[in-house]
Image (tube, coloured by chain):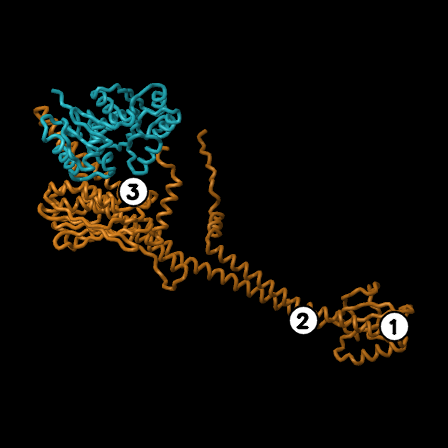
Chain colours: A orange, B cyan
Amino acid sequence: MSEAVPEADPKPPVRIRKRRRFLRSAGVRFAVLYALVFGISTIVLAASLRYSTVGLLDRQTHEAIRVDARGLATHFTEGGLPALVLTLRNRIDENLNDNAIYLLVDPLGNRIAGNLTRWPQGIDAPHAWYTMPVERAGLRSHALLRYYELPGGFQLLVGRDVSTRSQLRHILRDGLLWALAAMLLLGVLGALVIRGLFKRSLADISATTRAIARGDLTQRVRRSGSGDEFDELAETINDMLDRISRLMDGVRQVSNAIAHDLRTPITRARARLEDAAAHARTTEELRGAVDRATDDLDGVVKVFQALLRIAEIEAGSRRSAFADIDLAPVLDDLAEFFEAAAEERGIGLDIAWPRELPMVGDRDMIQQAIANLLENALKFSPAGCRVSISARMDATHIEIHIADQGAGIPETDRPRATERFYRAESARSTPGSGLGLALVSAIANLHGGILRLDDNRPGLRAVLVLPRRAPNPDSTLRIKLWTQNLKKDALTPTDNS
Amino acid sequence: MRILVVEDDKDVAGFVVKGLREAGHTVEHADNGRDGLFMAASENFDAIILDRMLPGGIDGLRLLETLRAQDNATPVLFLSALGQVDDRVKGLKAGGDDYLTKPFAFAELLARVEAMARRGKGEGPTTRLAVGDLEMDLLSRGVKRGGQKVDLQPREFRLLEYLMRHAGQVVTRTMLLEGVWDYHFDPQTNVIDVHVSRLRQKIDKPFDAPLLHTVRNAGYMLRVEEP
């Protein structure tokens, strides 16, 4: 068996696929819907028009014949045959439109009076309505007829010539058909226009998102400025893209920093180990090198843990641990905890806060944030200086100030000081990862607050501003992103449980 | 002590087992959840060191939950790479007694396992602690050394109490931070050392034989030095 069996193509042929795709287009769907609604309303309009014109004429004719016949019957009852014949003649003469039709025959079928020459064939049932061609004064026309039986075997035919009505009906039908055709055309045109509008409005969004997907994050959806729904959508998408690109910048900056801040100690550890392996002469030397390399690696681990913790906090998943807490004892404990270390460095601590600082938040996190700020202050304070911790509260916020008299951060650098791995020039010589303030800032943001860095002249004044009530995320977009995260968490099975 | 190590990583397991044996413990090792559960349920151990992510269908959390459902109260220390606060909470809620995140220092692991196993023995509520000639009365909150009264701040008292409760064991800085201050962050500075040295000033300085010792690369230990 060498012949290759052509594989059955599981996909439908191109044309069908194309048609399916065409129907899947939202623009086409809306357009078809529009045409359908338009067409149905046109047909309803035509039907009601027809009913109210042709139908009305029909009903009027029927009524006229009925009234006529009733009148004639009365004459016959009151004055007998001569009165009826006289009335018939009068009516025929008085009929200016020449549309009334009468025929009176005797029991044998001989014509007595009327304007029809002979009894039309096929009329045999009394009180039934007949619409049929008749011949009158040599002219063929259409008539609506009704046949009445009179006492004595006389038979009376009363009718109306309806050829004008038929003409009217034809005219109306033609008119409606034309109108229908025109409306169909308009419907299709309208549908095409709607589809075009859709396409144009979505094309830009689609082009932008495609560009973003390709990796070009600078693209933004053009706004029409009309303030309509598409404009709103465009704005939301642009907001989202701004946030994504900020996050991307963050990631890029972090990966650059990781490359530097983690590579350096890892390189150092590696070099130490390799050097010791090659050159250590005594066990002591070897052990010393291993110990120092372990210290380097511990530093790397610390940086990793801080990074992960920031990421964890920024993801916002820890908001579940929020509770009613009082910051005053938290501050008491922290002041006591760091007081000894400050004293050892010859730094005085000034403390001042109200007896109660109630708020809603995560105690562990706020503890860590304040501890980071305090450690920073102690680290950058020369001996003999003072570090002050103070807090104040109003109806909505608690502010915690931690001020030192060290070198501070230059004003130009302050906005960047809360970025990951930022280290001021003056701080390069002191140990630290450059993640402390980033962590504090992340914790503040999680609580809906901010970390503000002010000039203490001299030194740095770090102000942690925290709202006292449960935090409201500052924008709808954040809520959206947050809930998306939650959904994602709920969908993906958690780790190994 | 008899300790069970349930850990699938060969290197980590080898390192932990070797270290624990060197510290004088009897150690059994299981490299998957199924064997681990079987051993934990059928034999008596003083402590179990448990990884969370394990092969063999039963992970650490499930193993512990099964064990606790059988009324087995052996102290369990989680040793896991899952280090987020929520992971830690999950581990402790499942019945874990302690939680250590990888990577870890062996000294920290050893100190925590020994402290945990001792705690598990449950000596009952005590009112008096004593190490050598150092005495602590938990009711009157008084401390004496060699019959001489020592004045301590409340926090120093708690620090000393923790050290005395773990007398003869290595206590790491992290353990002190968690046990005495209830802090779960990692201070960059030597704050703990300062507190310990202040305490040392009060309980050791005026006396001949020091009780509070620094253990290099690990932490501190309160014990009577053998002559």
Of the residues shown, which amino acid type is indicated by label 1?
Answer: Arg
Q: For mark 3, what is the residue?
A: A312
What is the secondary structure assignment of the residue under circle 2?
A: helix
Q: Residue at x 13, y 20 (%)?
A: B226
Badge 2 vs badge 3, beta-carbon distance below 8 Å: no
Sequence-first disc among 1 and 3? 1
Q: Which residue occupies the foreground of this view, B10 or B1? A: B1
Of the residues shown, which amino acid type is indicated by label 2?
Answer: Leu
What's the CA distance linking mark 1 and mark 3?
Answer: 110 Å
Q: Do pointers 2 and 3 mark residues of a single chain?
A: yes
The mark closer to the camera, 1 or 3, is: 3
Instruction: Say above or below: A101 vs A466.
Output: below
Q: Is residue A304 left or right of residue B210?
A: right
| Residue A59: quadrant of the picture | bottom right
Where does the image place residue A117, in percent across and percent down from the top left? 83, 73
Q: Is residue A216 visible?
A: no
What's the CA distance linking mark 2 and mark 3?
Answer: 82 Å
Q: For mark 1, what is the residue?
A: A111
What is the secondary structure assignment of the residue under circle 1?
A: strand
What is the secondary structure assignment of the residue under circle 3?
A: helix
Where does the image place residue A149, in percent across and percent down from the top left? 86, 67
What's the CA distance linking mark 1 and mark 2?
Answer: 32 Å
**Numbered mark located on residue A168 in the image:** 2
The mark closer to the camera, 2 or 3, is: 3
> Label 2 marks which chain's residue?
A
